[in-house]
């Protein structure tokens, strides 16, 4: 249900009313009982929250593939050097006081 804005033509009091679209417009001011009329408002704006609102999020698959090919490739280290690192990390060194 939308929120409608009203303005009193007698006292310039402004108020909002949460109404159904099929409901009749309010014609009396709640403050002075003068004539009230519905005001055209700008409505709510867009509010972007969270991730997913970047131009690059909606690129085509062909664009993503071409962009991936343009990136420099990373050279992987051999598995032997990784094994020696893991053995060294398990050794404990005692410090003398």
Image (spheres, rainbow, N blue to C red):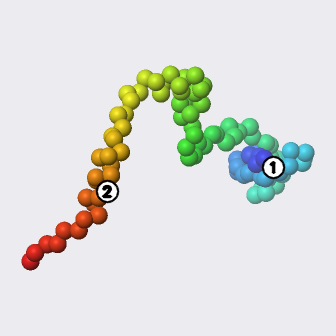
Q: Nearer the viewer, residue 83 or 40?
A: 83
Q: Look at the numbered discs 1 and 2 and tell me whether their residues touch, using CB distance below 8 Å.
A: no
In the displayed structure image, the side of residue 6 where residue 25 appears, left or right: right
Q: Residue at x 29, y 46 (%)?
A: 81
Q: Secondary structure at mark 1?
A: loop
Disc 2 crowd rating (10 Å Cα; few below 14, some 14-19, many 20+) is: few
In the displayed structure image, the side of residue 85 where residue 38 appears, left or right: right
For mark 1, what is the residue? 1
Q: Secondary structure at mark 2?
A: helix
User: Can the viewer see residue 28?
Assistant: yes
Disc 1 crowd rating (10 Å Cα; few below 14, some 14-19, many 20+) is: few
Residue 20 versus residue 41 in the image, above or below: below
In the displayed structure image, the side of residue 37 where residue 87 appears, left or right: left
Residue 18 versus residue 69 in the image, above or below: below
Q: Nearer the viewer, residue 87 or 32?
A: 87
Q: Nearer the viewer, mark 1 or mark 2?
A: 2
């Amino acid at each position: 249900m939308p929120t409608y804005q009203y303005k009193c033509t007698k006292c310039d009091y402004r108020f909002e009313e949460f109404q159904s679209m099929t409901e009749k417009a309010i014609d009396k001011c709640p403050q002075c009982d003068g004539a009230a009329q519905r005001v055209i408002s700008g409505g709510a704006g867009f509010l972007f929250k969270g991730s997913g609102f970047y131009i690059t999020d909606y690129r085509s698959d062909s664009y993503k593939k071409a962009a991936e090919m343009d990136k420099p490739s990373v050279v992987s280290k051999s598995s032997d050097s990784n094994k020696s690192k893991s053995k060294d990390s398990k050794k404990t060194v005692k410090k003398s006081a």
